[in-house]
Each structure stands twice: as C-alpha cells, then as structure tokens.
Amino acid sequence: MKPLFLENELPVDDLVRIGLWKDGKAALSPDNLRAMLAGRRTGLVTLENVQADGFLIKQLDVKLSLNRSDSGRISLQAHPIHHEIQSHPLLTEKDKKLLTEGKVASIGKTVEDPNGKAQHLIFEYDAETKEFISYIPNKVQAPERVNGELLTEEQKRAFQSGEPVELSDGTSFQHRASEPNGILSDRIALVVSVLMDGGISYLLLRGLRNLLSNKQPQKDEYTAGFKMALAAMERQQAQKDL
C-alpha cells in the first residue's frame, strides 16, 4: 500500500516559501515527513521570518499537512496555535464538549460529501492547535502487525476508526490523526509492521504519547513481542545493508 502522498509530489514552492526546503529536500525530521506523506499532521514546527498578509513574523509554531484538491493539485496547509477553540460546522455543541474535555478520543459521523454521497468521518480534537480535525477511516493504513502480533481484520477496522486495540499481552494502542506517528499507546514504544509495495516494512516508533483514556503511567516497552519484532527489524535492515 502506498502512502497518500509521494515524496516527489511535495509542493516545493510552498516549502521554499517557509524555509523548509534545503539542499533539494524537505527540511523536516523523518517522523514529520512520514506524517505528512501519510496524510497526517506533523508535530509543531518552528518557522522563522515568515511573510504573511504583508507582515514579517519572526517566529511561528505550526503543524503542517498536505492537501490534494479535486483537480489533483497538492498544497501545504499550515495549522497555527489558536488562542481559542475553533468551531466546526459538522459537530454539535455536545460533540465538541465531549472531545475538548477528553471524555471521548474521537467521534464518528456519517455526513454528506460535496457530491451528495454519504461519507463516514472520524473527528478528533487537536489540543495543541485547538482545532477539530477529521479523516476518512478507510484511507488510514492499519498495521499488519504490532510487536510481532498479527492484527485481525476487526482490529484493523477498529484502528482505522480510532478505537483502542489490545494485543494478547495487554499492550493497547489506537490511531490518532493529530499525532505525527499516528499512534497513541500505553507503552512508550512499539514496533509496527506495515505492508508496502516492496513487502513488509518495520517501523520503530519511540516517544509515543499515552492513550487519552489511560490514567496510569505508560508501561515499559520491552515485552517479549517487542523484543522479537525489534530483532526481526534489525535482521531486515542488516540484509538491506549487504
């Protein structure tokens, strides 16, 4: 499965304009670049000396994402930190209250798309930018394995919808569109296996944030499954280096 965007599709002019294109490539961390190509938001990125509406802004912290228009044009979207919670036309006051107070991690709604067809969306609240964001669940790539454990189709669908998924060893995780890595977990690191065009690829995700519903400190990542998956990832990398 390909990411939603390819690296050669990046809007170079937009990145140049904000000082994030250097030496022929995007001046972003690997995690932030991967987040953008997957259709998610980056973490907070500090921009310097940005021209906006005729003003020079010395420093601005924003999250970035990519957008593909109906015509296929890809543009860079900036999501600054707002002082007040931004509204959303598709959410009720009750929805917004549940999300902003952390009573629920996400809300699913079926709405009408611009072509008049029913479209199921998942809504989240990004507390850093104080915005509500939405995504189409079937466009989220669910992992094939997490810490070496094969996910069922039901678990994959739950992940795409932002619902918690629990492994046999008790490890829990869920998709989060506002996170650069796209995952929250009750463990601080996971080894995720994803299906790419060239086969299975491993990703070691460290520094994960805790599940919104988990009031306990995150647990150590070194489960038996994590160790085995990490060893498999290292073997794959060693073969690539030959």
Image (cartoon, rainbow, N blue to C red):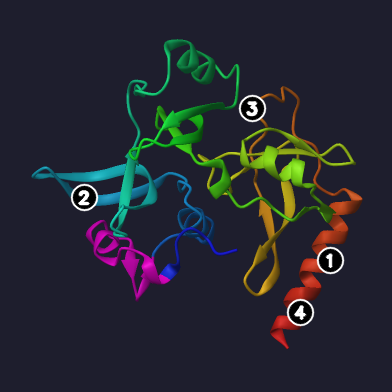
Crowding around mark 4 (Cα neighbors within 10 Å: few <14, some 14 to 19, many 20+) is few
The residue lying toward the viewer, choosing from 220 and 177, is 177
Q: Amino acid at mark 1?
A: Ala
The residue lying toward the viewer, choosing from 130 and 39, is 39
Return the mark for residue 50: 2
Mark-to-mark CA distance, 1 and 4: 10 Å
User: For the residue labelled by badge 3, is the local secondary structure a helix, a strand or a loop?
Assistant: loop
**Viewer can see residue 51:** yes
What residue is drawn where x is 48% and y is 48%? 40
> N-terminal of the two: label 3 or label 1?
3
What residue is drawn where x is 45% and y is 61%? 5
Q: Amino acid at mark 2?
A: Val
Disc 2 + disc 3, Cβ < 8 Å: no
Image coordinates of residue 178 in percent, x first then y, are 50, 39
Mark-to-mark CA distance, 2 and 3: 34 Å
User: For the residue labelled by badge 4, is the local secondary structure a helix, a strand or a loop?
Assistant: helix
Q: Amino acid at mark 3?
A: Leu
What residue is drawn where x is 50% and y is 41%? 136
Question: Circle 1 is placed at which residue position?
Answer: 231
> N-terminal of the two: label 1 or label 4?
1
Question: Circle 4 is placed at which residue position?
Answer: 238
Q: Residue furthest bottom?
A: 242
Q: Amino acid at mark 4?
A: Ala
Query: For the magenta stretch, what is the residue range?
Result: 8-26
Image coordinates of residue 227 in percent, x first then y, are 86, 57
> N-terminal of the two: label 4 or label 2?
2
Image coordinates of residue 69 in percent, x first then y, are 31, 52
What residue is drawn where x is 53% and y is 47%? 180
Return the mark for residue 212: 3
Q: Is residue 136 above or below residue 230?
A: above
